[in-house]
Image (cartoon, helix red, strand yellow):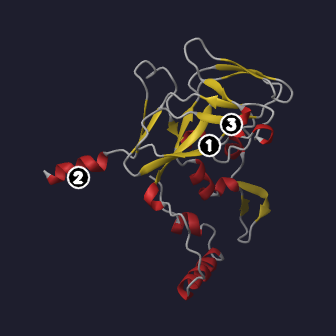
């Protein structure tokens, strides 16, 4: 009996997404962030053939930086639920939205809600993306909602970040955003990535960090890692980084 109970507990998901039955199978589903790696990152070459590093090999680019790739692959992307028409003027003081007939996907927050004339994006009101997915996390877990990590070439809009206790709030969470694109007159397509949702265990978040000087052992650890890096090109990637499942 105990084995069965622990087996069920182990299979309980940390995070899940669900929607009403009328939307299921119709609106785009959340997907792992690894499906949305920034285009600029995917385009670059892994090395610079015309340059050599300290080992005599071709100089590596950001494409070889696994910490950067790991960050962009973390979490789950929540996409826009339906096509929506957007028109703006030359300073975004006017933003006109045409929601599709079957579903509201964009409304607005007033400029005053973000500080009035000093608000980010002023003079434009903040766009509010209507999210039709409920995010549910295991007890003790919250969800951090962020703009897609390192997706710096998306200048149309930026969703504002938030941390929600999604283990206690089983309700849709909408995403306020600052709209950037001036003189815009296009249809924003369903599936456009809005935010990345990253589950966070609340007990691991401490209010105050520990600030101290390093110990002799910690100093030696730094020195030893540097010595290894002076002899091998891929110390972090091949020897120190935990393999991702």
Using the rendered view, name the quadrant where residue 105 is placed.
Answer: top right
Q: How many marks?
A: 3
Tag 1 secondary structure: loop
Alpha-carbon span between mark 3 and mark 2: 47 Å
The quarter of the picture where residue 229 lies is bottom right
- Vertical placement of residue 57 versus 225, above or below: above
Question: CA separation, marks 1 and 2?
Answer: 36 Å
Q: Earlier in the sequence, mark 3 or mark 1?
A: 1
Q: Residues within 10 Å of mark 1 (few under 14, many from 20)?
A: some
Q: Mark 2 Cα within 10 Å, few/some/many (few <14, many 20+)?
A: few
Residue wearing tag 2: 6
Mark 3 — residue? 113
Asked whether, in this view, residue 131 is left or right of residue 166, the answer is right
Residue 211 in view (yes/no): yes
Q: CA distance from mark 3 to mark 1?
A: 32 Å
Q: Which mark is residue 37?
A: 1
Which residue is depicted at the point 70% across and 39% down? Answer: 114
Where's residue 211, x and y in %? 59, 75
> Horizontal and vertical percent for residue 218?
55, 82
Q: Nearer the viewer, residue 202 or 65?
A: 202
């Amino acid at each position: 009996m105990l084995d069965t109970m622990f087996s069920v507990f182990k299979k309980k998901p940390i995070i899940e997404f669900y929607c009403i039955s009328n939307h299921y199978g119709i609106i785009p589903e959340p997907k792992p962030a690894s499906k949305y790696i920034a285009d600029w990152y995917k385009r670059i070459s892994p090395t610079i053939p015309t340059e050599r590093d300290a080992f005599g090999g071709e100089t590596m680019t950001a494409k070889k930086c696994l910490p950067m790739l790991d960050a962009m692959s973390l979490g789950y992307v929540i996409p826009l639920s339906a096509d929506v028409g957007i028109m703006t003027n030359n300073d975004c003081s006017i933003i006109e939205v045409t929601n599709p007939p079957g579903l509201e996907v964009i409304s607005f927050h007033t400029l005053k809600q973000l500080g009035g004339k000093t608000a980010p994006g002023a003079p434009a009101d903040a766009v509010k993306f209507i999210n039709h997915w409920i995010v549910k996390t295991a007890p003790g877990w919250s969800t951090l909602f962020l703009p897609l990590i390192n997706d710096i070439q998306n200048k149309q809009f930026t969703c504002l970040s938030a941390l929600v206790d999604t283990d206690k709030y089983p309700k849709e969470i909408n995403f306020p955003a600052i709209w950037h694109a001036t003189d815009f007159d296009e249809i924003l397509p369903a599936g456009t990535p809005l935010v990345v949702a990253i589950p966070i265990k609340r007990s691991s978040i401490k209010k105050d960090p520990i600030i101290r000087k390093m110990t002799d052992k910690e100093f030696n650890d730094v020195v030893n890692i540097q010595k290894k890096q002076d002899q091998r090109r891929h110390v972090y990637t091949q020897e120190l980084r935990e393999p991702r499942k």
